[in-house]
Image: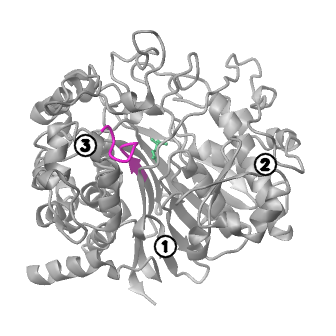
Amino acid sequence: MKKYAVILLFMLGFGLAQPTATGTGGAAATVDALATRAAMDILAQGGNAIDAAVAAAAVLGVTEPYSCGIGGGGFMVIYLAKDKRVVTIDHREVAPAYFNPSVFNGPNGQPLPFAERVNSGLSVGVPGTVKGWEEALARYGSLSLGRVLQPAIRVAQQGFTVDATFAAQTQANLQRFRYFTSTSALFLPGDNVPAVGSTFRNPDLARTYLLLASGGSRAFYTGPLAQAIVNTVNNPPIAPGVTANIRPGRMTLADLANYEVRIRQPIVSSYRGYTLYGMGLPSSGGPTIALALNLLEGFDLKALPRERALHLYLEASRLAFADRNAYMGDPEFLDAPLAGLLSKKYAEERRKAIGERAAEGSVQAGDPYPFQQDPSAPLRPRAQTQRWEGESTTHLTVSDKEGNIVSYTFTIESTGGNAMVVPGYGFLLNNELTDFDATVPHPNSPEAYKRPRSSMSPTLVFRDGKPVLALGSPGGATIITTVLQTLINVLDFGMPIDQALAAPRLSQRNLQTTGVDGGFERSPEAQALLGLGHRWAPTAEIGALTAIAFNPDGSVTAAAEPVRRGGGAAAVERSR
Ligand code: GLU
């Protein structure tokens, strides 16, 4: 039996995984074959979608350690079929008690260079993932944390096969991984990038998961593991001879012990008869997507020539980002004018700003206050300096035969987080606090106990009370445009989900240029759009989406990327 399991893991590890699967019963789509397999195994053992999602996430913590893991945080959007309701679990990282608006400034008062912010103890938010998993299981799961961690413990012990993506990500991090003794010991065996095809084991992480399996989140947020996190943040394990300026943080045991997840209302919006449930603040994902769709609802996209429809998509996204950048942040710290921003009347007004040609560069935020119930609210728009926003992260999508659905995005922010492995525990710490804005005052300025604004956009779409689509993606701020564009591809252009997610991506975020991948800049539509003033910034790839489509005939289609990030893995309980 054990041998069989090992052979199966081996085969899946070698890319026999399918990016698309259609059938009945439960389904899963992740970026990784072993994670998808873990989700399906848990479903087969009688677990529900919530159990399966945590199992898959824990495996991703092993096989995608640069994108996600217990050193970070995330957002889970859950549909509970029996109750017919959607809940969201915010387990975003929180700034420690010592944090303040000038924490990222150097001695001269100037903001520190970005790399010095990332590779520091300052950028580490109190991780939320373990409490997020525990809370999801306790409230909505059917199995224990100890049980759903089993597949991940096995993968960490037995290892996974290093693929080209893992090797390339390690290579890209080579220099900063060498800054820290614990990190090079784990990820640079023999001081080098692990060879493609070799087996990568993480026995420390296996032991950490075993600790959580028996001790629950207490074993993470208190005791020796909590102490090890605090030590790493405050006294980074810098290798001898490193000259880079690596600043410590000042996290305390109390910061860890006090961490809390938040159960939040989803952002509910409508688009052409569909109902969308998105992640609310502190993620800007849900509101920004809703805002852009409200703008687009005024145009019959499917009846327009494709380049015209794409022009409208880009300009709607530009306007939505202007408002996102100006108004959104942690809802416990500011009263963002969401009612106004998300009203259809505001969209009617704001839509007038979409021209026949691309706007030149960045546009100003709109004024949603007349559309609020109380138009006197004090927050005024804040211009935001454009800054780099991550490209790490991972998204997974799981459903079960009872109809429960989980759309889950989680991250450690940059690929490789802050580059510090907690010595002896086998996981990287996040640099999530670089998601704060350096501009002060700003809705997203750094403050103690605050959660930095996110772009993560786990999303569910319904029609007439029935699920239609669950989806999400990594990619920093491009997460928002990736999810938005995929929604339009499906809901407006009628593309099947596998084609919708494989299509070239266009990402306009209120910038001079539009990011494009998949060779879009060479397409006839791209040429036509140049004539309207659009400018392209071609890039290797944008996002890595996973989704489940609930088909009208009662079947489900799970879908992952065929190419981006080396391709993902989709599975269904009974395939067709
Ligand atoms: N930190 C980012 C966010 O929360 C996600 C990072 C990424 O996707 O690279 O929006």
Residue 13: where, in percent of width, then height?
27, 74
Res 73 → quadrant: top left
Residue 570: where, in percent of width, then height?
41, 74
Q: Which residue is mark 3?
A: 177
Q: Which residue is mark 2?
A: 295
Query: Nearest the camera: 555 or 166?
Result: 166
Residue 566: where, in percent of width, then height?
41, 69
SS of the residue at dot 1? strand
Labels 1 and 2: the sequence-earlier one:
2
Side (left or right) of 220 relative to 435: left
> Disc 1 residue type?
Ala
Q: Is mark 1 within 8 Å of ligand 1?
A: no
SS of the residue at dot 3? helix
> Disc 3 residue type?
Phe
SS of the residue at dot 2? helix
Label 1 to label 2: alpha-carbon separation: 28 Å
Q: Quadrant of the N terminus?
A: bottom left
Labels 3 and 1: the sequence-earlier one:
3
Side (left or right) of 254 relative to 382: left
Q: Is mark 3 within 8 Å of ligand 1?
A: no
Q: Which mark is residue 559?
A: 1
